[in-house]
Image (cartoon, rainbow, N blue to C red):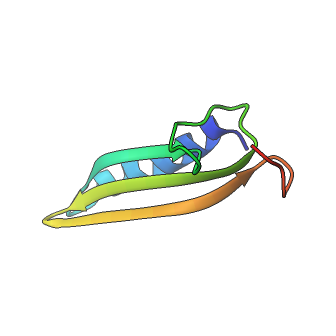
Amino acid sequence: GSATAVRDAARLVLDDAARATPPLELDYLALVDPSDFTEIGDDHTGEAVLAVAARVGATRLIDNVHLTFGPLGAAS
């Protein structure tokens, strides 16, 4: 999938969580190149990191997922 599709899918999940009780309050959602942490575009191939930070009540949650775009083993 494309970077846009990944961001859109993540945002759908986070939007659902924002309607929960207690609600998730998103601090940031970023899809970045792990070598320099710049946002990636739909033409990106290689490694990427989907990073998210949010709050649920007084608890801050931070997580990330490593992804590969394009053929496995493709370089950026």
Left or right? Give the position of 26 relative to 13: left
Q: At 56% from the left edge and 47% from the top edge, which residue is drawn? A: 9
Q: At 84% from the left edge and 57% from the top edge, which residue is drawn? A: 73
- Give x and y (percent) for residue 14: 40, 52
Q: In this view of the protein, which residue sits in the foreground, 42 or 33?
A: 33
| Residue lying farthest to the bottom in this orientation | 59
Left or right? Give the position of 31 relative to 53: right
Q: Quadrant of residue 60?
A: bottom left
| Residue lying farthest to the left in this orientation | 58
Left or right? Give the position of 29 relative to 3: left
Q: Quadrant of residue 57?
A: bottom left
Q: In this view of the protein, which residue sits in the foreground, 18 or 56?
A: 56
Q: Total marks drawn?
A: 0
Q: In this view of the protein, which residue sits in the foreground, 36 or 21?
A: 36
Q: At 53% from the left edge and 36% from the top edge, which residue is drawn? A: 39
Image quadrant for the N terminus?
top right
Left or right? Give the position of 61 relative to 76: left
- Give x and y (percent) for residue 26: 30, 49
| Residue lying farthest to the front in this orientation | 35
Q: At 20% from the left edge and 63% from the top edge, which residue is drawn? A: 22
- Give x and y (percent) for residue 76: 74, 43
